[in-house]
Image (cartoon, rainbow, N blue to C red):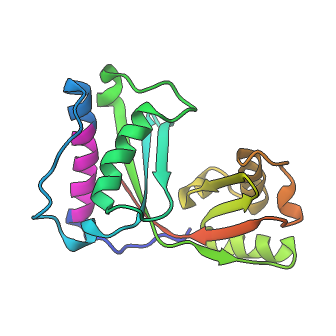
Amino acid sequence: MLVLVFMKQKDKKYLLELARRTLEKYFQNKDILQIEIDDLSDSLKEKKGVFISLWENETLRGCVGCLEGIKPIFEMVIENSLASALFDSRFLPVKKEELNKIKIEISIIEPLKKIGFSNNEGLIKHLKKNQPGILIKKGAHQATFLPQVWEDLKTPEEFLSHLCSKAGMKEDCWKNIDFEIYQYQANVFKE
């Protein structure tokens, strides 16, 4: 799996605490956490994509994010923590009583890189070796899987079939490679 280690441990710890404080503040009084940014490290102010995954008893409870850096990392952590808890359409919103059972995982996304293959054998070989995060696009259809999804979907064929299905396309659409494909790396850390 392609995973980067570009962020200092203290920044990772800060972001996990920020995500936790964001959720606690919201569930305490429905307010959005405001922070002082003067003391933040430069790496926390970089514009990168950020996904927040919430886990309860090793089961996904919410995951929302953005692949591209449209805002600084610290802002994306605040926004996506709330979105993961409240607005992931696959799940009911997290309740206040669940909060102490929730574990937070943060994925900081590196820039997308478009890749192309003339046949699916080349794509399969590449994915088997590198196990990157993948985004596929075709018309109005698109879907992504973070690099850590490889832990559950072990083969490239299984990974691509589920990704095509998630995008609303036929499960075997990957065999024709008639869509745009992008790969990316992520710096993943969790509580």
Q: Residue at x 23, y 64 (%)?
A: 11
Placement of 45 over or under 95, stated as above or below: below
Q: Which quadrant of the figure has residue 20?
A: top left
Q: Residue at x 70, y 70 (%)?
A: 127
Can residue 191 be seen here? The reply is no
Q: Which quadrant of the figure has residue 54?
A: top left
Can residue 158 be seen here? The reply is yes
The range drawn in magenta is 11-22
Q: Position of residue 170 (x, y in %)?
A: 85, 48
Q: Position of residue 184 (x, y in %)?
A: 56, 70
Placement of 151 over or under 31, stated as above or below: below
Q: Position of residue 178 (x, y in %)?
A: 85, 65
Residue 21 among those drawn in magenta: yes
Q: Is residue 130 left or right of residue 170?
A: left
Report how many numbered discs are placed on residues in the image.
Answer: 0
Residue 44 among those drawn in magenta: no
Residue sitting nearer the eye, 57 or 113:
113
Q: Residue at x 50, y 24 (%)?
A: 92
Q: Residue at x 56, y 68 (%)?
A: 1
Placement of 131 over or under 102, stated as above or below: below
Q: Position of residue 112 (x, y in %)?
A: 56, 72
Q: Which quadrant of the figure has residue 114?
A: bottom right
